Amino acid sequence: MASRIPLVAGNWKMHKTPAEAGTFARNLLGNLPNNLAVNVVVCPPFPALPAVALKLADSWICWGAQNMHWDAEGAYTGEVSAPMLQALGCRFVILGHSERRVLFGETNEQIRKKVEAALSYGLKPIFCLGEELATRDAGEAEIFCLSQLADGLEGLPWANPEALVIAYEPIWAIGAGRTAQPADAVAVMERLREKIASWHGRDFAEKVRILYGGSVSPESIGSFMKEKQIDGVLLGGASLKLDSFSAIIRAAAEAKQGT
Ligand code: 13P
């Protein structure tokens, strides 16, 4: 089994002004030792990216965006592009989050174009997928997630396994205060990894990081990170507070040490 460095990503959604985000980033950096065996990325709202970039420049913590358009420029009111994010030092971009899919009508086809554009600019997509509760209750969670994976990624020029991260976020667990059972998340992730192996080979698939997201807290992080299949977490609410974000980052680093 390839050893994958754990990743903890904070999706701040529509929270924090530039001043708040900058202060938070500085405090996060000050709150953590810089030799933790974990990668960390914060994804503030667009207007806060410069403030966060300023505080985290030359540090071990990365930053990224929560969305982008697939074209480099054009008449798209309200949109931002990969080269614009790159110019702000972003290394990651969240794509296909269920809030984009459900609340803003993003389609698989659009998300696929975004992933392709991000890859071509060297931005790492955090490609999100996950089922509604009714789909899980119908026993179709795995098949649904596999189809989202294929719609988003099959056939794309994804040459390096580390160029993209997958986040399994069951919609019913997001902001809900209840997580998926780690074993259920693992079952989905195993199927996703098998599918990636069928496209790119087993060695490639073993190097792809797959995160869990949905109501992860300092109390629940250990139960996820002890699973070999789970390479980290995509946090919403818990990444907004210094204490909970730092505790989760430390726990993620410790959990994978020596495994
Ligand atoms: P919560 O951690 O608040 O459930 O949000 C998860 C999420 O949507 C991260 O992208």
Image (spheres, helix red, strand yellow):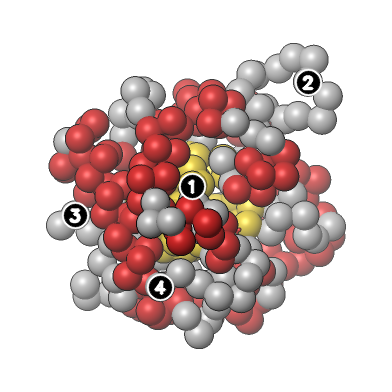
Q: Nearer the viewer, residue 242 or 59?
A: 242
- Pointer 2: residues within 10 angstroms few (<14), some, or many (20+)? few
Instruction: Give x and y (percent) for residue 175.
Output: 65, 67
Instruction: Give x and y (percent) for residue 19.
Output: 84, 60
Location of mark 4 (residue): 181
SS at mark 2 in the image: loop
Location of mark 3 (residue): 2
Q: Is residue 113 visible?
A: yes
Beta carbon of the mark 2 residue lies under 8 A of ligand 1: no
Question: Residue at 19% of width from left, 54% of height from top?
Answer: 2
Q: Nearer the viewer, residue 137 or 234?
A: 137
Location of mark 2 (residue): 76
Q: CA gap, disc 1 to disc 4?
A: 17 Å
Earlier in the chain: of badge 2 and badge 1, it is 2
Question: Residue at 47% of width from left, 80% of height from top?
Answer: 220
Which quadrant would residue 181 be assigned to in this image? bottom left
Identity, as a three-letter code, of the amino acid under mark 3: Ala
User: In the figure, 162 relative to 6: above or below?
Assistant: above
Q: CA gap, disc 3 to disc 4?
A: 24 Å
User: In the figure, 43 relative to 183: above or below?
Assistant: above
User: In the figure, 181 relative to 92: above or below?
Assistant: below
